Image: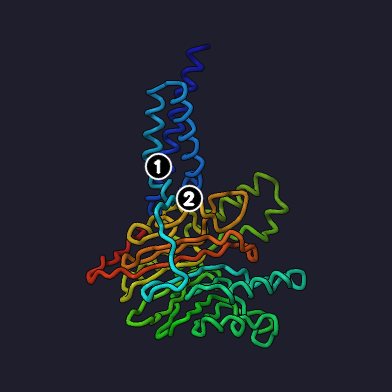
Amino acid sequence: MKIKILRLQKIRKITWVLFTLAAYGSVSLSLAWLGSGVLLSYCIPLLLLGNFLRFIKNLGQKRWQMALFYGLLCLIGFPFWQSLVAFSWGKETLPIVLPINHWAVLTYNVHLFHYHQQPQAAQKTQQLIRWIANENSQIQCLQEFYDLDSSQKFCTVRQLVAQRPYYYLHKGSTDDFGATIGLAIFSAYPIINKGKLTLAATENPLNTCIFADIVKGKDTVRIYNVHLQSMSLSGDKTLTNSNLLKKSAIIFEKIQRSALLRATQIQTLQQHIAHCPYPFILCGDFNEIPCSATYFALKANLYNAFEEAGQGIGATYPSAFPFLRIDHQFCSPQWQVRSYETKANVPYSDHLPLQVIYQLRTTNNPPKFQATELKP
């Protein structure tokens, strides 16, 4: 009996190790296998926590060999700790008036300003528009933007241009009232060029990417605003009316499909930014957690603002899952990230806004971006 128990314990440990290593390796999967491995990457936060707790437990029990074993698993998972939890020490307080080579950039999914929830959400709509109008970033990238010029309440562009008079609003969709629904970039400085990327495998017209080339003093930079494929779980009636087994199958299929679509969209995006002639900032609602293949493909040659200057977990989509940081800001190597803040006290949308302050590096020969593609 004792031999059987020891054998089961050994099998359990081997299974745990293999599962952990498979999950860690899932971020390197090719596009063809990504759908099968995406759920493994979603397990990484729990595996990291489990290995850390086992390391502490064995250390406390003076089981040095097992403590070393789980310590090695924690060490192998260190890149994921860096993506999930940030500790930025020694960041100085920046002045209220930023120097000329500093740029403050906000990204925020504004949830269509709750136009589909009127009149119940009328107060929240007003609070949301007022907060964005008074917010102090020089650049604002807004997803799920809604503008109806003929409406007093939803003429959002007219209400937001006082501090940032230059803007690019892309119409991805409309409604019965003729509103403009899509992505928007607002800028305190002139926009000299703008455009839209046609992302591959896009099913929703709101899932796209726009960019604006902005001039400030002698510097020209490019700002990308992106909204990638979501899992489309909310509002799905099949989930409400299904049993547990069918519901699980539907959720798995949606997660798998959306991950594949995002991976293809990221490839299109990488091809475009690889030829960008200016220092660039890439921000928006990626619908991607910070321990996935697409996230790691982007951060291979870009700086992630949270990892550079964030604090704590930095979740941007409040839910029961604390690691849902699905809104991101990345930047090319010409930038230094000086400050990062998730506005956790702004409860006006289903996402949280995040503001990052950047400084252009003074080097004459900044490193060149090279795309790290997800192999087909």
Nearest the viewer among 7 and 142 is: 142
Q: Is residue 150 left or right of residue 27?
A: right
Q: x and y percent of residue 351 in the render? A: 59, 62
Disc 1 residue type? Gly
Q: Is residue 26 above or below residue 302?
A: above
Q: x and y percent of residue 282 in the render? A: 42, 68
Q: Is residue 244 left or right of residue 315?
A: right
Residue drawn at x 49%, y 66% is 355
Nearest the viewer among 218 and 277 is: 218
Display coloring: rainbow
Quarter where residue 211 is shown = bottom left
CA gap, disc 1 and disc 2? 17 Å
Disc 2 residue type? Val
| Residue 271 seen anywhere in this rendered image of the structure | yes
Determine which of the numbered discs, if any, sits on residue 77 in the image: 1
| Residue 264 seen anywhere in this rendered image of the structure | no
Nearest the viewer among 124 and 11 is: 124
Reading the chain from its start, which is encountered first: label 1 or label 2? 2
Q: x and y percent of residue 192 in the render? A: 40, 86
Say few, some or many: other residues with alpha carbon within 10 Å of mark 1 (under 14 / 14 to 19 / 20 or more).
many
The residue labelled by disc 2 is 38
**Label 1 vs label 2, nearer the camera:** 1
| Cβ atoms at labels 1 and 2 below 8 Å apart | no
- Quadrant for the C terminus, please: bottom left
Q: Is residue 155 left or right of residue 107?
A: right
Q: x and y percent of residue 162 in the render? A: 56, 84
